[in-house]
Image (cartoon, coloured by chain):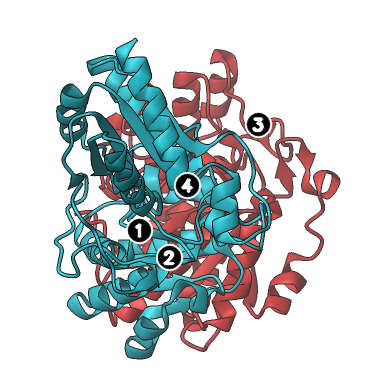
Chain colours: A red, B cyan
Amino acid sequence: MKHTIKELEDIASQIRRDIVRMVHGCQSGHPGASLGCTDFFTALYFEILNHKTDFTMQGAGEDLFFLSNGHISPVWYSTLAHAGYFDKSELATFRKLNSRLQGHPTTHEHLPGIRIASGSLGQGLSVAIGAALAKKLNGDKSYIFALLGDGELQEGQNWEAAMFAPFNKVDHLIATVDYNGQQIDGPTSKVLSLDSLQAKFEAFGWHVINTDGNDMQAIVEGLHYAKTLTGKGKPILNLMSTQMGAGVDYMMGTHKWHGTAPNDEQLAAALAQLPETLGDY
Amino acid sequence: MKKYTYTEKKDTRSGFGAGLHEAGKKNENVVALCADLVGSLKMDAFIKDFPERFTQVGIAEANMIGIAAGMTIGGKIPFTGTFANFSTGRVYDQIRQSVAYSNKNVKICASHAGLTLGEDGATHQILEDIGLMKMLPGMVVINPCDYNQTKAATVAIAEYEGPVYLRFGRPVIPVFTDPDQKFEIGKAWMVNEGTDVTIIATGHMVWKAIEAGEKLAELGIDAEIINIHTIKPLDDEAILKSVKKTGCVVTCEEHNKFGGLGESVSRLLVTELPTPQEFVAVNDSFGESGTPDQLMSKYGLDAVNIVEAVQKVIARKKS
């Protein structure tokens, strides 16, 4: 372990503070799933990934991460800043004119840590597979990680990619699904049921594991375990249960905070629940 | 009129296949992907010599574009291959976000463009692809005119860093350009110098323009013929220089008159040098089943249509 679980939880608390402050600062953005995935991002960047903050697009010899559900950019930006990719003061520019921190992640503004634009849903798994194929051709045995939203699995391209990866033995790929059961118009079970994602991915030939995405110990162990499953001919799918809005009581368990910013009063109520551990930007 | 002859007819897609093979030999980072149309795209030679650098994605074009974008991150130069319709309209958002906006070094290689796909009919005959692709910021759009030019273009785009759309076709047509040509992206080719009218043609329409030039010469009209193989970036200088001399222009393309080469030329001329222009292009219509020759005739894309357009535009110039 590079960090204790307590240290990781402290980092996550600061990232959650950043998320609500960033979204409040521009009165737009997507706090719900950003908060839900904060523990995953913290575990990934501070414990799991072999990566360099001296960013290169190719990332030769490094593990690569791709975010498909780009609307949860606040959690990624805060994580990258705290990991050392850029100064955390830049978080104040989120979604504002002339910022590198666009509403959805992009390479266009050359923000260190971002390797592809995402936001239009359903494209990230294909890109991650492509990056994995290139690593294989280059003889680079590093891992490729991807995060997908559960709602975006309604996009057909995911299933083209899901069919391709096991058939082509893309087995250094660990894709995580943020399984929060919510999307803009309501619960996924009501909008368009995903039914059993485990059965679906297993039928396509993936090795599926289940983790609790809001338990730091569980997510760290789950991702370490996922790595031990690689190199055996199958891509790995981490079905990660999360609570949308995790860490802020009034945002939890509802789709209402998918894309809504808190007002001043709501911000204060959120920050009161999230200890400032590393200093606000 | 400069005399152009040919000894054989070949399809431009075979020029692509030969160029891809050559690019693969030159640079080990060149990789190819195909969505179940290996034979149609003439990728066999590449696959035979570089099997590990070829990815068959099946009938899943969206996934193909995403995978190609991802492969560039590892330093690869992916060439995707499928029909023009499935290379563009079907996957427009994937190209827009994962390739163009992300500025990835993907070469989108599109065969069976336009009416000359023939008997399969309008579902497969895209006539809107140049417009779709040229609207994407940073996208280079190339539509070569014969086997040799397509081969040279394929080799050239491997050496260019950035997203490219390369459009070619199915039918065999005369091979009349230099087999050893150096292809320069964005640089027009002067097919014939003349004084009375500028004919600007791309793709399969270049040979038709040469045929039209010969007929026009018999009628005493001295046509300048320019091949614009690169629709974006457009060779503004070559077009303006020619039009300054001739004072009128006819554009020729196997594409909808909306959004194609003709409109790119219009945009240039209306801002720099307003000039009478006629369009030889498909008149905002879908295609249909038929032989390539029948379709080019029915939809007004023959040499005779170019001759008529020239006569019309010269009359407008004089009035």
From mark 3 to mark 1, how far is it between C-alphas? 37 Å
- Asked whether, in this view, residue B290 is left or right of residue B139, the answer is right
In the rendered view, does A86 fall on the left or right side of B193? Answer: right
Q: Amino acid at mark 4?
A: Asp
Mark 2 and mark 1: span between their CA atoms? 8 Å
Residues at marks 2 and 3, CA–CA distance in whole angstroms: 40 Å
Asked where in the image residue A253 lies, by quadrant, the reply is: top right
Discs 4/2, front? 4
Q: Chain of mark 2?
A: B
Q: Which residue is mark 3?
A: A257
Please identify the quarter of the rendering in which residue A248 is found.
top right
Question: Which amino acid, by three-letter code, is at mark 1?
Answer: Val
A18 versus B100 height, above or below? above
Chain letter behind tag 4: B
Badge 4 or badge 1: first in the primary sequence: 1
Evaluate whether residue A10 shows in this view.
no
Residue, disc 4: B302
Please tell me how crowded label 3 is: few (under 14), some (14-19), or many (20+) other residues with Cα within 10 Å: many
Answer left or right for B111 relative to B295.
left
Q: Which residue position is annotated with label 1?
A: B106
Residue B80 got which mark? 2
- Image quadrant assignment for residue B51: bottom left
Callout 3: helix, strand or loop? loop
Q: Position of residue A200 (x, y in %)?
A: 74, 70
Disc 3 versus disc 1: nearer the observer: 1
What percent of the width, then of the height, locates residue B290? 65, 59
Tag 3: amino acid = Trp
The CA distance from mark 4 to mark 1 is 34 Å
